[in-house]
Image: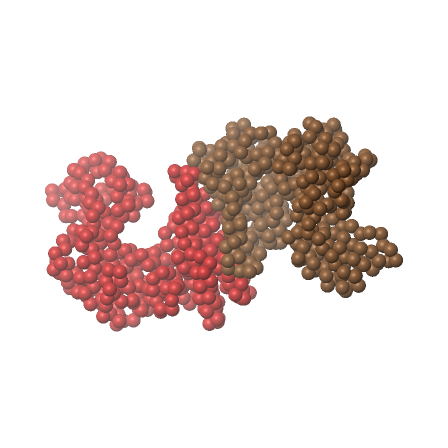
Chain colours: A brown, B red
Amino acid sequence: MALIVQKYGGSSVADAKRIKNVARRIAQAKAQGDQVVVVVSAMGDTTDELIKLAYQVSKQPDRRELDLLLSTGEIVSSTLLAITLREMGYQAISLTGAQAGIRTDSAHSRARILNVEARRMVKELEEGNIVIVAGFQGITDEMDVTTLGRGGSDTTAVALAASLGAKECQIYTDVEGIYSADPRLVPEASKLTEIGYEEMLELATSGAKVMHPRAVELGELFNIPILVASSFNDSPGTLIHGGASMEVRNKVRSIAHDLDVAKITVVGVPDHPGISAAIFQPLAGAGISVDTIVQNTSIENITDLTFTVAESDLAKSMKVVEPIARSIGARECLSDTRLGKVSIIGTGMQNTPGYAARMFGALGEQGINIQLITTSEIRITCIIEESKVIDAVRALHHAFQVEERE
Amino acid sequence: MALIVQKYGGSSVADAKRIKNVARRIAQAKAQGDQVVVVVSAMGDTTDELIKLAYQVSKQPDRRELDLLLSTGEIVSSTLLAITLREMGYQAISLTGAQAGIRTDSAHSRARILNVEARRMVKELEEGNIVIVAGFQGITDEMDVTTLGRGGSDTTAVALAASLGAKECQIYTDVEGIYSADPRLVPEASKLTEIGYEEMLELATSGAKVMHPRAVELGELFNIPILVASSFNDSPGTLIHGGASMEVRNKVRSIAHDLDVAKITVVGVPDHPGISAAIFQPLAGAGISVDTIVQNTSIENITDLTFTVAESDLAKSMKVVEPIARSIGARECLSDTRLGKVSIIGTGMQNTPGYAARMFGALGEQGINIQLITTSEIRITCIIEESKVIDAVRALHHAFQVEERE
């Protein structure tokens, strides 16, 4: 008997009616003869409401307490789903992260899964139960409840799939799959039937919000095929896996974009070893994720260092960087928030010349000025004016004929 | 250093403002130099709302799942309280029932505490923390979450006080203490400064809703003084303890009443051994609590058996009793719902004649007909018409001059 893991997001279980809908989908999967483990997020806005409550009593709620508080959201949705399945006549049991054996480190609000002690889950599956697991949470060696941070429930699902040897991890959400570009911006964007782990990772880190890169990485590590599909209809979705066919690996697969970009430039930095570390280690220590980093060639041992962060992190970043800039003798710190990011992604670009030139050309034709450029083996990213991002996505989608992919 | 356990009910932590108020009270207790453990109920109507959610997806929610669902209510209030105390600069940590080591049997929705593994609580107290424990919940050997049923949070508080060797368990609620009668019915009713365990038990089982008898019993068993007081003001409250002074043990201490009474009479029962068991064991099996039982002297081996149950249990009780009555050859089953119960309570009545006669006289003067009478060593209870209960409470309060007690 094979086993599948399904994950349903918060909007899919937002009320009793939607929970019943999800229960019917689970029942269908069970009827196909597989063992089924289901991971759920908290209902609708529950997590936000709990956070609001915490901020009503504290300006900076303690992270351990906040984790325990937030963990209740997924317990509520998972018990309700188990109750619904039992009402429909199915054997089902809900497990908290602790009961499911999800052991994490003790980094509250962003814990990492260390291992899964699957004994209880295996026992419940062997007894014929559909096992519903509260997503986004785990437990430390001290029995303290942790939450996994962004992408937590997806990560729970992939981790359970890996530890239980599932044949597939199915992520059900409010979109129908992975698209060649955001279909709200590019009407002719098409849904991909399949995509490789690396392409999906580049997509996720380049602004596509469908799946968190962390869960994709875990899937790649354990080679778990991940299906991303809608929980509201039976449209086939997109399969993320390692064996994407040769043919489709040959071109640009998708255009990603991100409007939440701010740029910081440290001007007139004396260029000697250790300068980058002096700036970026404190930023990492403050929990700020730095995205693109560009350092120009230095002239007379003086260089400019530019990097991007999320707009929401800009004020915090400037507070960290400005005193450092002074102390290392830089001239000044400049910032700009009206920026966006556009990327073309595809394993087909590896070692194939011409993609960058075509990208810059397509943007130039639209009169779009490129401020920064970064690349990986399978991705080219340009930082441009925020107001030009939509035009850029459309132009690139057309230039690379992404919609003709399949 | 001494230790006190405080318990706050759901109305005391119903919103952020009240949680802050409770936090200030806890801080005062801590400032007096004691170690403090706090047990909280779920905020306001949270438990009812969770139950409503469960009934939206099931006619009869599974009890294990319902317990896990409901346990989230107390986790939310306890984490918020810990966050509030930390915001105020105090060291505080919240613990779930599982983390606090509250081990129970596996009777979901009405679990009994088997023991408390206090190791984690002791560690947190030694580190200087105020320990906030989610009330009403525990965990089985299988790591399944249970709830304790009625009086659950009070029972948690007394159990923790017993296992930690607390000098006092303080139950803060929305009334100011234990009264000589319900002050809403008898304006001259006075608050008792102290009361013995047994008197409190009789009061609690005779209709006074302030504390559940289960928690009082546990307090008596471990000789834990229990203070009942208001969480909204600093009025001194009532101390329930074993050492109530000789002097106040000499009279009727309190008048209790209960409007939620229904009577069932099985008429014409052949009187032979085993008949009572044949009726009352199935009732117990159906989870119905039988209160007063009266069996008349049998005439020609035929007797009538009368007992009372809560009005809400009447329909269920009749369904159980009617087929049994037929099978044992009784003539018929009668029921009456328009009944109430009034009791006089006081250890001073032990072995002292005259109390019963004075009670019956006082009721007779008001033209109140007594349908059933039961007594314990320290209590006399009369079942009367529901519409006469308020008059009866006032008349008895006056007749026994309860208000002049202290």
Residue at the image point whose x is 29% and y is 48% from the top: B289
- Compared across the picture, whether A278 is left or right of A62 comes to right
- Compared across the picture, whether A329 is left or right of B305 comes to right
**Residue B218, image quadrant:** bottom left
Q: How many marks?
A: 0
Residue A214 is at least partly visible in this image? yes
Image quadrant holding the N terminus of chain A, namely top right
**Residue A356, image quadrant:** top right
Q: Is residue B135 above or below residue B336?
A: below
Nearest the viewer among A106 and A297 is: A297
Residue B39 is at least partly visible in this image? no
Residue A293: image x %, image y %?
A: 76, 50
Nearest the viewer among A307 and B237 is: A307
Residue A57: image x %, image y %?
A: 50, 59
Residue at the image point whose x is 55% and y is 55% from the top: A66
Residue at the image point whose x is 44% and y is 48% from the top: B70
